[in-house]
């Protein structure tokens, strides 16, 4: 048996140079004065950059934002014994009271589980654990073990009432597929409430931008190529860009690759033609949920789903080197470097 090292790449990176002028809202103060804050939360490296604010004001906003991220982490962590999610997972079927944030995120996440017909399923945790993704002690579970665990995977079993959250024995929540997206939305709300109009955050590869760059041009967000380096760049204004990829966290055994995104229908890591899915949407939680769900669905089903739910756009990188975009990205996506020679297909309605 061969067990290889796990590789973790951040899928996207903000490129700060080389944007085309764009008629967006401009920050008014002279000079951009970017102020950047770095932290680790939700098990990942995060950066926040805000522009055109006096230093002390910017620092205060960033401190508040960092506090919010730490708070969300403490509520939503699946491993931290003090978190609301941990308490619910270990409640033995008792109802656990919820904070406003956990409740809002759960409501949004459960709606997306429903809409994606369970391609996203926030109760997938027992299966994620069985494959070793929670500890790094990777293994391939037997079919019978997976079958037994899948009996506990069912987002419709999550009870959310005014009193709080109730999980039947054995059902466990994991908000790993949506928590960073929700955090991005909360940061944008916080920044907007201060009157800020230019900021960008990277939360472990999730990018979310408020407004335009200070010069009025769109932000450029680079999309990671599965083999390393970059496959392309997206120009965005006021959007979230989130990538889920099979190359981000995986292990290899006997020549087979097993990634950290699980198909809830089979209990097995996703294996299809896709190397990654990048979703561009107004809201971070939607982009985060859909990047995971469309990756589970695979290309054909993802296309069909987008035609029925046209309030977002996506980019697929296929394992064979083809890039595929929905038509709304035609004017804001370009291939990058070596990928300029790759085929680019456009999906139309
Ligand atoms: P990441 O947050 O690692 O960038 P994703 O947003 O795609 O990537 O979330 C993947 C995480 O979500 C996994 O590590 C696991 O905890 C959880 N997960 C895996 N498969 C699913 C699924 N089908 N539905 C919901 N959550 C999932
Ligand atoms: Mg996700």
Image: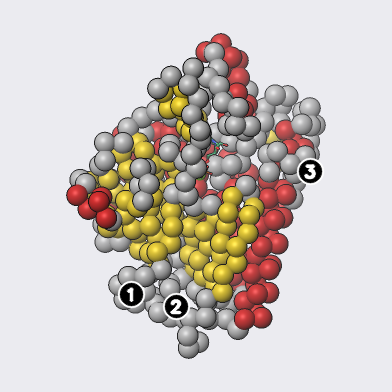
The label number, if any, that marks residue 102 in the structure image:
none
Q: Of the residues under marks 3 and 1, which one precedes in the sequence?
A: 1
Q: CA distance from mark 3 to mark 2?
A: 40 Å
The label number, if any, that marks residue 82 in the structure image:
3
Q: Residue at x 55, y 17 (%)?
A: 141
**Residue 56 left/right relative to 240:** right
Question: Can residue 290 be seen from the camera position used here?
Answer: no
- Depth order, front residue of 327/55: 55
Category of crowding for the residue at label 1, using alpha-carbon neighbours closer than 10 angstroms: few (below 14), some (14–19), many (at least 20) = some
Nearer the camera: disc 1 or disc 2: 2
The answer to whether the residue bearing label 1 lies less than 8 angstroms from the nearest atom of ligand 2 is no
Snapshot quadrant of residue 59: bottom right
What residue is disc 2 on?
214
- 70 above or below 243? below
Question: Can residue 276 be seen from the camera position used here?
Answer: yes
Dot 2 lies on which element? loop
Across and down, in percent, residue 129 comes to 61, 28
Residue pushed farthest top?
144
């Amino acid at each position: 048996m061969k067990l290889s090292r796990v590789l973790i790449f951040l899928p996207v990176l903000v490129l700060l140079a080389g944007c085309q002028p764009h008629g967006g809202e401009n920050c008014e103060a002279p000079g951009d004065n970017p102020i950047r804050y770095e932290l680790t939360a939700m098990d990942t490296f995060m950066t926040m950059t805000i522009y055109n604010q006096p230093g002390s004001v910017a620092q205060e906003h960033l401190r508040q934002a960092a506090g919010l991220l730490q708070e969300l982490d403490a509520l939503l962590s699946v491993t931290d014994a003090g978190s609301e999610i941990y308490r619910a997972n270990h409640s033995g079927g008792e109802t656990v009271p919820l904070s406003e944030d956990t409740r809002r995120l759960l409501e949004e996440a459960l709606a997306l589980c429903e809409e994606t017909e369970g391609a996203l399923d926030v109760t997938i945790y027992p299966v994620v654990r069985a494959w070793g993704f929670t500890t790094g002690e990777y293994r391939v579970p037997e079919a019978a073990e997976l079958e037994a665990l899948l009996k506990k995977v069912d987002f419709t079993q999550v009870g959310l009432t005014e009193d709080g959250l109730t999980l039947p024995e054995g059902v466990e929540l994991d908000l790993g597929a949506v928590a960073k997206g929700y955090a991005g939305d909360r940061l944008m709300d916080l920044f907007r409430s201060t009157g800020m109009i230019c900021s960008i955050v990277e939360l472990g590869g999730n990018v979310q931008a408020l407004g335009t760059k200070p010069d009025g041009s769109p932000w450029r967000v680079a999309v990671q190529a599965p083999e390393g380096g970059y496959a392309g760049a997206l120009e965005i204004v006021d959007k979230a860009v989130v990538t889920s990829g099979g190359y981000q966290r995986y292990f290899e055994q006997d020549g087979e690759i097993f990634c950290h995104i699980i198909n809830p229908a089979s209990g097995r890591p996703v294996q299809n033609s896709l190397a990654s899915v990048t979703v561009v949407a107004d809201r971070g939680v939607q982009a985060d949920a859909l990047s995971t769900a469309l990756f589970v669905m695979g290309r054909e089903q993802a296309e069909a789903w987008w035609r029925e739910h046209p309030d977002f756009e996506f980019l697929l990188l296929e394992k064979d080197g083809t890039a595929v975009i929905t038509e709304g990205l035609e004017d804001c996506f370009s291939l990058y470097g070596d990928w300029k020679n790759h085929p680019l297909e456009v999906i139309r309605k």
